[in-house]
Amino acid sequence: MVIYIGNDHGGYALKRILIERLKELKIPYVDVGTDSESIVRYPYFAAKVAAAVAEKKEDRGILICSTGIGMSIIANRFKGVRASLCTDPYMAKMTRRHNDSNLLCLGGKITGEFEALDILEAWLREEYEGGRHDISLGLISEAEKGLCQDKIPEYELLFHDTTL
C-alpha cells in the first residue's frame, strides 16, 4: 500500500505532521501537495490524489485543506473513490469498516495534531468488514456507472494553474 497525500495552504502544517507519522510507521507515501502556506486552489491537489487512488485500487489517499470539506467534495467525484471527512477516530474506524474508505479527508484548521494522528492511525489500522456492507457498496458502484465517466480526466488540463 502507498498513501498519496495532498494538501492546499490550509492543510500544509498538518500534512507535515502526518508525513512524519507515516515515516515512523514505515508506510510509503507520495506527497503531491503544496509545500507552503501560500494560497493555492484545493481542487488541483484533490484531483491528483483522487485520480491516483481511482487508478491504483490497492493504494489510499489523504487530503487536507482548512476544513476537509472542499477536498471531500471533489474527491468523491472520481469513480471508485470513497473519500471520508473524519473529525474523530471513531469516524475513521467506522468508515474503514463499513464504507471501505480509500481516501481520508482532514481539516488542517479544525483538527488538532493529536486528534489527527489518532484519526490517521485508526483509518490505517481498520479493515473493511464486508458482509452486509457489500450491499451498500454495490449500490454505490451501480450509481457510479450512470454518474461517473470511466476515463479519469487529465487533471493537469482541468486544473492547470493552482494559484488562480
Image: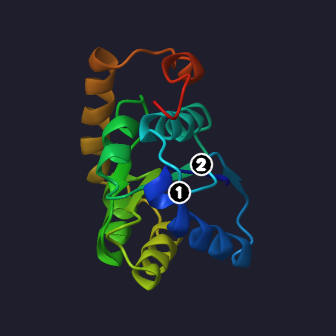
Disc 2 marks which residue? Answer: 33
Q: How many marks?
A: 2
Q: Determine crowd level at label 1: few under 14, some 14-19, many 20+ residues with C-alpha closer than 10 A.
A: few
Marking on residue 131? none
Q: CA distance from mark 2 to mark 1?
A: 11 Å
Image quadrant holding the C terminus, namely: top left
Q: Position of residue 78 (x, y in %)?
A: 42, 30
- For the point 52% across and 72% down, the residue is 125
Labelled pair 2, 1 in contact (Cβ < 8 Å): no
Q: Position of residue 79 (x, y in %)?
A: 41, 28
Q: Position of residue 70 (x, y in %)?
A: 32, 45
Q: Is residue 53 above or below residue 145?
A: below
Q: Amino acid at mark 1?
A: Glu
Q: Is residue 9 above or below residue 42?
A: below
- For the point 35% across and 55% down, the residue is 68
- For the point 61% across and 68% down, the residue is 16
The answer to which of 130 and 66 lies nearer the viewer is 66
Q: Amino acid at mark 2?
A: Gly
Q: Is residue 159 left or right of residue 86?
A: right
User: Callout 1: helix, strand or loop?
Assistant: loop
Q: Position of residue 20 (x, y in %)?
A: 67, 74
Q: Is residue 146 above or below residue 15?
A: above
Marking on residue 37? 1
For discs 2 and 1, the disc positioned in front in the rendered view: 1
Q: Is residue 28 above or below residue 22?
A: above
Q: Is residue 21 left or right of residue 49?
A: right
Image quadrant holding the N terminus, namely: bottom right
